[in-house]
Image (tube, rainbow, N blue to C red):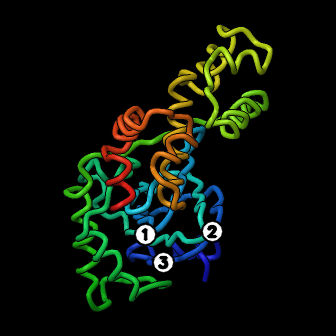
Amino acid sequence: MGLIAALPEIDRHPDSVFVMHEASEKLIPLHAHTKGQLSYVEGGVAHITIGFRTYVVPARHYFWVPKGLEHVVRIGHSGTVFRSLYFYAEHDENHPFYSQLGIYPASELLIQMIGYSKCWDGRHVSRTDENFEFLMALKQLLPQLGHKSLPIVLPITDDARMNTITRYLRQNLAEPLSLQTLSKEFSMSERSMSRLFQALLHISFLQYLKTLRMIQAIELLLKSRQSISEIAFQVGYHNIGSFSNAFFEFTQARPSDFRKN
């Protein structure tokens, strides 16, 4: 059973944990469930869209989606393994961790525990099942392990003009982009272009461009064998030090360490 086909199954037994491990390249459409979702991303990058904000989840990170929150998930690389556990919502109100979206680096302990859950792949695990206490312990550990969320967010919009502009940026990241060059490309004043970003994406042009470059860098580090200097150049940085500092600001890791991990 694929994850899309399994969506109606998740809430069938409210007091259970539903386990789903899948290696695939898919768009999982807008949905919500009455259970909290823990998903670990292995070997690629996933994107979660909530409203008009898209969050980036790199490999060896996990995310928690609280119950009832509508979201879209895109698994963007065929080598990605997506390991998900959908937990009963009992007592979620007892800790703020369970009521908010969060993206966190995975510890070795959590990776091993999630990996062990593969023995229940594709089924519900209830309180009467052997070793249910293992899954209870996993859920209870999450607030202790998830201290600092990694909110790499790229806003989106339905506006056709802005989508044309952001598509142009994605296709020309290696170029020396600036508000001036972008405004000239689309026959707008710099002031109008700046206001457009603020009005439709609620972010400055420079912050949007920097975020876009970091997301592309993360994907290239995980998917390609290009050197770090090649990746830096491909996303628009001509100075390795500047690229490394910008990358650290977003991920709290240097590019070399991020790839190694």
> What's the residue at 65%, 59% (across, down)?
29
For the point 52% across and 47% down, which residue is it? Answer: 231
Residue that mark 3 sits on: 21
* Mark nearer the N terminus (1 vs 3): 3
- Please tell me how crowded label 3 is: few (under 14), some (14-19), or many (20+) other residues with Cα within 10 Å: many
Q: Which element carries disc 1, helix, strand or loop?
A: strand
Regarding mark 3 in the picture, which secondary structure is present there? strand
Residue 85 shows in this picture: yes
- Separation of marks 1 and 2 at Cα, in angstroms: 20 Å
Q: Residue at x 41, y 71 (%)?
A: 85
The answer to whether residue 56 is above or below residue 172 is: below
Rendering quarter of residue 257: bottom left
Q: How far apart in space, not on screen, are marks 1 and 3 (Cα)?
A: 11 Å
Who is closer to the viewer here, 52 or 62? 62
Circles 1 and 3: CB distance less than 8 Å? no
Q: Are marks 1 and 2 in contact (CB under 8 Å)?
A: no
Q: Which residue is labeled 1 in the image?
A: 86
Q: Earlier in the sequence, mark 1 or mark 2?
A: 2
Residue type, numbered disc 2: Glu
Q: Is residue 1 placed above or below 248 in the rendered structure?
A: below
Q: Which mark is residue 145?
A: none
| Residue for badge 2 | 25
